[in-house]
Image (tube, grey):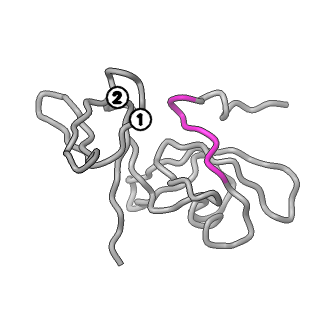
Amino acid sequence: MNREILFRGKRWDNGKWATGDLLQYQDGRTEIHSYVEGCRQADEVDHRTIGQYTGLQDKTGVKIFEGDILRFRNLYDEEYETAAVVWYGESGYTAFDLKEHQFECNGLAYIVQSGDYEYKVIGNIHDNPELLEVTP
């Protein structure tokens, strides 16, 4: 099975998201390359917004990217939680995971694979940081 490798980033010219192949130049420019109507297109993006596709989708089929915010709940609980999808690549642990979660192991993999969770992408850390704020 082939793994789909995609990146996304916010375009400098209009603030919209571009999705495709990542290209980073030595001069600091970052581009996302994609195909539009059969023609290769290059969009210069803000490198701070780059996120990689996790290979997973939420319950509605939306692709989950690094930097997305997930709303999730255990099917046996009524309370929802939110967490950002992050990439951990230090100390021998490399994986997409949920930032500051309560799981003993990889939270993102657990909620997707266990079948015990309902989960949905509700935004991302660049456009909707307020979704991560804790409300009493």
Residue at the limit of the structure toward the top, as seen here: 13
* Range of residues picked out in magenta: 120-127
- Report if the CB atoms under discs 1 and 2 are less than 8 Å apart: yes
The residue positioned 51% from the left and 62% from the top of the image is 56
Quadrant in the rendering for residue 11:
top left
Q: Is residue 21 magenta?
A: no
Q: CA distance from mark 1 to mark 2?
A: 6 Å
Q: Secondary structure at mark 1?
A: strand
Q: Secondary structure at mark 2?
A: loop
* x and y percentages locating residue 129 in the rendered image: 59, 29
Q: Quick check: 45 left or right of 104?
A: left
Query: Which labelled disc corresponds to residue 17?
Result: 1
Residue at the limit of the structure toward the front, as seen here: 37
The residue positioned 19% from the left and 39% from the top of the image is 24
Q: Closest to the observer: 118 or 34?
A: 34
Q: Closest to the observer: 30 or 40?
A: 40
